Amino acid sequence: MRFYLVQHGEALSKDIDPERPLSDTGQAAVVRLAAFLKGRIRVSAVVHSGKTRARQTAELLAAVLAPGLPVEAVSGIQPNDAVEPFMQQITTAGKDTLVVGHLPFMAKLVARLVTGSEATAIAAYQPGSMVCLATENDIGWQIQWMIRPELLSAAENHAR
């Protein structure tokens, strides 16, 4: 089973728009991430926090990575929510899942799954980052890889 844990893309500030939708830069970074991952990952569920920026990020990713799969808002993954309830819910679902949320929740979830303690910082998220966690044969959760937007930008610039 794999989890793809994403911090939403870069959003507009509250001063510009209180709903905090994705900025043009944030949208472009998420589209670039989706294009890079197309054909490389498969998901059976796509969930998000319900906030505009998380929903938009989830929709952009799902359109490319899981066309036709419904994108669902779930409770328990707001920035300051406790990770344990959501962790229990998702780990018993038994399917590869893309989760789009916020800091500090996403970083704490990764830390809790991998180390057993949400206080141990192990993933340096930034808007538009994705961490892939996997578990097999009851060995626990392990980080398989992490992608940050600047890596994809650097790769595109290098390819030119």
Image: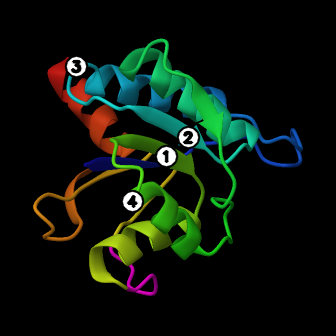
Whichever of labels 4 and 2 marks the residue nearer the N terminus, that label is 2
Residue 25 can be seen, yes or no: no
Q: Start and end of the magenta stretch?
A: 117-122
Is residue 120 one of those drawn in magenta? yes
Q: Are marks 4 and 2 in contact (CB under 8 Å)?
A: no
Q: Are marks 2 and 3 in contact (CB under 8 Å)?
A: no
Mark 4 to mark 1 CA distance (whole Å): 12 Å
Q: Dot 3: few (<14), some (14–19), or many (≥20) neighbours within 10 Å?
A: few
Most foreground residue, 128 or 99 = 99
Q: Nearer the viewer, mark 2 or mark 3?
A: 2
Q: Label 1, label 3: how many angstroms apart (C-alpha)? A: 18 Å
Q: Quadrant of residue 98?
A: top left
Q: Which mark is residue 39?
A: 3
Categorize mark 1 by other alpha carbons within 10 Å: few (<14), some (14-19), many (20+): many
- Picture quarter containing residue 21? top right
Q: CA distance from mark 3 to mark 4?
A: 24 Å
Task: Please report whichever mark, 2 or 3, sits nearer to the chain's N-terminal start.
Answer: 3
Element type at marker 1? Answer: strand
Q: CA distance from mark 2 to mark 3?
A: 20 Å
Label 3: element kind: loop
Q: Which residue is mark 1?
A: 99
